[in-house]
Amino acid sequence: MALTVKNDKKNVILRLKRIEGQVRGVQRMIDEGSHCNDVLTQIAAIKSAVNQVGLIVFENHAHECIHKAIHKENDEEKFTEIVNMMSKLMK
């Protein structure tokens, strides 16, 4: 399943680029010997940002599955697929 809404795709790409910059920033902080508390704060921010990206992708996928289920596809199979995707996201 690909991101189907153009704005969602653009939003996810922008968020991922921001995350990439944050990760490079943490690498730089570690190279420069920054205080562990500062590094951990940035790591927490990265984790939160990655979670938000996952939620956007999951929401897009769930909407697509629900749409297909409404249009007479196997709704039980789609429900199981949504639950499995949420399980992956929460790990």
Image (cartoon, rainbow, N blue to C red):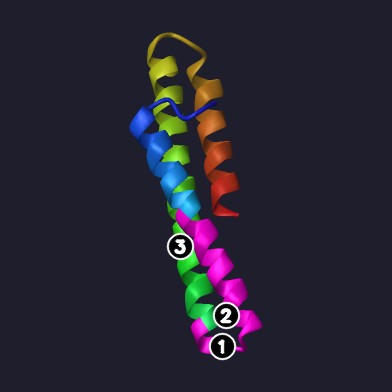
Q: Which mark is residue 48?
A: 3
Please tell me which residue lies in front, 40 or 15.
Answer: 15
Would residue 19 be visible to someone looking at this image? Answer: yes
**Residue 32 magenta-highlighted:** yes
- Image coordinates for residue 3, horizontal then vertical, percent: 46, 30
Identify the residue shown where x is 47% and y is 31%: 61
The amino acid type found where label 2 is placed reads: Met
**Residue 29 magenta-highlighted:** yes
Principal secondary structure, stretch drawn in magenta: helix
- Image coordinates for residue 77, horizontal then vertical, percent: 56, 22
Would residue 55 be visible to someone looking at this image? Answer: no
Q: Secondary structure at mark 3?
A: helix
Q: Which residue is mark 2?
A: 29
Tell me whether the residue at label 2 lies in contact with that at label 1, contact meaning CB atoms closer than 8 angstroms: yes
The magenta span reads: 18-38
Identify the residue shown where x is 55% and y is 48%: 89
- Image coordinates for residue 55, horizontal then vertical, percent: 44, 46
Q: Which mark is residue 68?
A: none
Q: Which residue is mark 1?
A: 34
Q: Residues within 10 Å of mark 2 (few under 14, many from 20)?
A: some
Q: Mark 2 and mark 1: span between their CA atoms?
A: 5 Å
How many numbered discs? Answer: 3
Q: Residues within 10 Å of mark 1 (few under 14, many from 20)?
A: few
The amino acid type found where label 1 is placed reads: Ser
Tell me whether the residue at label 3 lies in contact with that at label 1, contact meaning CB atoms closer than 8 angstroms: no
60 relative to 74 in the view: left or right: left
Q: Is residue 74 above or below residue 14?
A: above
- Image coordinates for residue 34, horizontal then vertical, percent: 56, 88
Q: Earlier in the sequence, mark 2 or mark 3?
A: 2
Identify the residue shown where x is 55% and y is 30%: 80
Q: Quadrant of the N terminus?
A: top right
